[in-house]
Image (cartoon, rainbow, N blue to C red):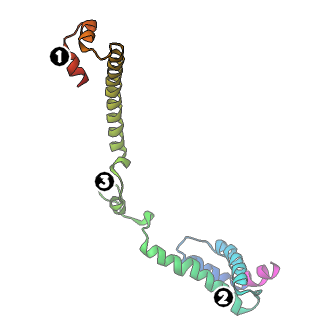
Amino acid sequence: MDLFESVFLRDRREDFNRLARQTKGELTADDLRSESFLMALHLSERQQRQLDLACPLDQDLIIGSLRNKFVKWSDRVYKIAVRIDQQEEGEDGMSSWFLQLPAEMSSDPLVQLELNEEQRILAKILKSSFSQLSAYIVIFSRFDDDRDRICKYLAIVKKNIEKAIG
């Protein structure tokens, strides 16, 4: 670690600053210094040898790997990705990419409120019709499905009971 700090980090200070600028603010030079230590360990394992941090070739290998990981390949991803913080907003304040995202209508808060209200109304209707239905089931079972006796007991005409049980 002493050789890493004294030789590598000191010799490559400008490279870290340059890479930090190339990341367009995504990483600082200090972030890249920290990552360089991890990259050196990774490269040592991959090449199955101890890197010589005083050797300019090994230093170039580490810096080049950092550049590939944080500048070259991440730029490629960013070129095809949508940058949320750089999108222009439309008239309604929403970004254009947002309007292109597929989503179910129920994910809209207004639609969700309307669906919840409809469900409450349906639950209320179901609750009232369920209690009526359950009452008819109990009555029919007690009177052995004799509709004439049920009509006399409830004091209703047969037409009403037919309408109620559908």
Looking at the rendered structure, which numbered label has been put on residue 159? 1
SS for dot 1: helix
The earlier-in-sequence mark between 1 and 2 is 2
The crowd level at tag 1 (other Cα within 10 Å; few <14, some 14-19, many 20+) is: few
Looking at the rendered structure, which numbered label has been put on residue 146? none
Residue visible at 52% across and 76% down in the picture: 74
Foreground pick, 69 / 89: 69
In the rendered image, residue 154, in percent from the top left (x then y), is placed at 27, 8
In the rendered image, residue 162, in percent from the top left (x then y), is placed at 21, 20
Per the model, the C-alpha gap separating discs 1 and 2 is 93 Å
Q: Is residue 98 above or below residue 38?
A: above
Foreground pick, 38 / 11: 38
Q: Main secondary structure of the magenta part?
A: helix
Foreground pick, 106 / 110: 106
Residue visible at 47% across and 73% down in the picture: 78
Q: Amino acid at mark 3?
A: Asp
Q: Is residue 18 visible?
A: no
Looking at the rendered structure, which numbered label has been put on residue 61? 2
The crowd level at tag 3 (other Cα within 10 Å; few <14, some 14-19, many 20+) is: few
Q: Are marks 1 and 2 in contact (CB under 8 Å)?
A: no
Q: Nearer the viewer, mark 1 or mark 2?
A: 1
